[in-house]
Amino acid sequence: MVACELEQKDANAFPGVTLFTKRQAPGMKPTAVYLPPKHPTAATKFDVVIWLHGFYVKNHEFLFHSDPARLREQVRDSGKDVVLIAPFLGYEYAVGDTFAGNYSVSDLATANWGERYLEEILGALARFLGLSSTSIPQLQIGKLIIACHSGGGNGMRNLVGSLGKYQGKLTACWGFDCLYGANARPDDATFWYQWLSGQSGRALEIVYGPSTLPQSVKLDLIGRGLATTDGNQTQPQRPALKNLSVSLGHYDLFPAFGQMVRVNDLDPAFVDRFMIPQVADQPRHKPAPQRGEFLQHAISNVRSAFPFPKDIHYMIARGGFFSRLSKL
């Protein structure tokens, strides 16, 4: 196994402690680690957020230095004491109408990959922190959160099943514009519904934009007991899952009264007004369609009613991540 060693960079350029695995000792995955200013370096037990990135990330240092999600800034500005761990999953980029590169998350699904990866990074972090003390600390995870953006959604889907001994530490998964798996088996919406319904399920929060709208709306409707996995309306309505939140993406910052104001999630009741056809709008005595029309109508309604900003994809990453960090 390739050794894993961390080195500090940006010591005088950014608050907190920024670490990267050394290029000659990357371990299982080249990784970026951030300890915010509020984190006491002597702490041996702390909460961890794993961030799984999508395409267009060139290397692990790019994640903190150049990625439009601005991950360190969201952690710093939230004022929360969490350790951010971000593995590099490969570089994928557009070539005409297709993609090229080496982005892959298939190994995250192998047996106990998540446990082995966390053990390795915690060990490297302990050795780095031990350089300034007389002994190497034994580090422990308090709460564990998996967050992902864009193509990282498939990685999150894989990682929730390979955490091993850290499975019990997982408290939530946050997905930002990430449900692209309409052709997966099962599709993303069905997978997450089944995961949430099982014993290993934890809280899941999804924020979506136009490119991930179909699977996100599907998960929302089946999670609330309004639709079946085939896209038909449930008759009668099933009980809703209590550990699922699906919300529509929007501007993360908005100018108001001479300042930039952060925007909270949209009221779900407001979204429902244009997503779900109201009873009064339905023809009487007409049987409910059973070919997935209920879901397709809901998807079409959202597309036609909500004007997504042009750069919504990274707005969701920034605003969604900051908002959820702030609530910890």
Image (cartoon, grey):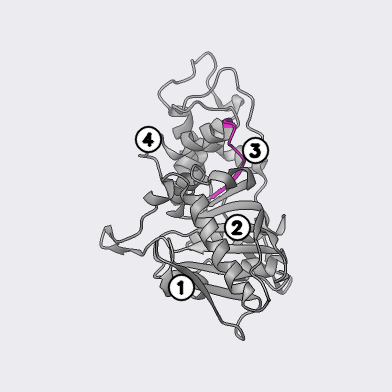
Q: Does residue 199 belong to the magenta stretch?
A: yes
Q: Looking at the picture, does residue 299 appear above or below residue 64?
A: above
CA gap, disc 2 and disc 3: 19 Å
Which one is in front in this view, the residue at disc 2 or the one at disc 3? Answer: 2
CA gap, disc 1 and disc 2: 18 Å
Which one is in front in this view, the residue at disc 2 or the one at disc 4? Answer: 2
Cβ atoms at labels 3 and 1 below 8 Å apart? no
User: Circle 4 — which element?
Assistant: loop
Q: Residue at x 39, y 52 (%)?
A: 105
- Of residues 24 and 31, which is closer to you in this image? 24
The image position of residue 130, as x and y in percent, is: 63, 73
Res 309 visible: no
Q: Which residue is mark 2?
A: 49
Which one is in front in this view, the residue at disc 1 or the one at disc 2? Answer: 2
CA gap, disc 3 and disc 1: 33 Å
Q: Is residue 59 left or right of residue 248?
A: left
User: Circle 2 — which element?
Assistant: strand
Amino acid type at circle 3 is Asn
Cβ atoms at labels 2 and 3 below 8 Å apart? no
Sort mark 2 into few (<14), some (14-19) or many (20+) by Cα contacts within 10 Å: many
- Of residues 314 and 293, which is closer to you in this image? 314
Q: Looking at the picture, does residue 198 appear above or below residue 134?
A: above
Q: Which residue is mark 1?
A: 62
Q: Which residue is mark 4?
A: 185
- What stretch of residues is rendered in magenta? 197-207
User: Circle 1 — which element?
Assistant: helix
- Of residues 119 and 63, which is closer to you in this image? 119
Q: Residue furthest bottom?
A: 12
CA gap, disc 3 and disc 4: 23 Å
Amino acid type at circle 1 is Phe
Q: Residue at x 36, y 65 (%)?
A: 91
Q: Which residue is mark 3?
A: 243
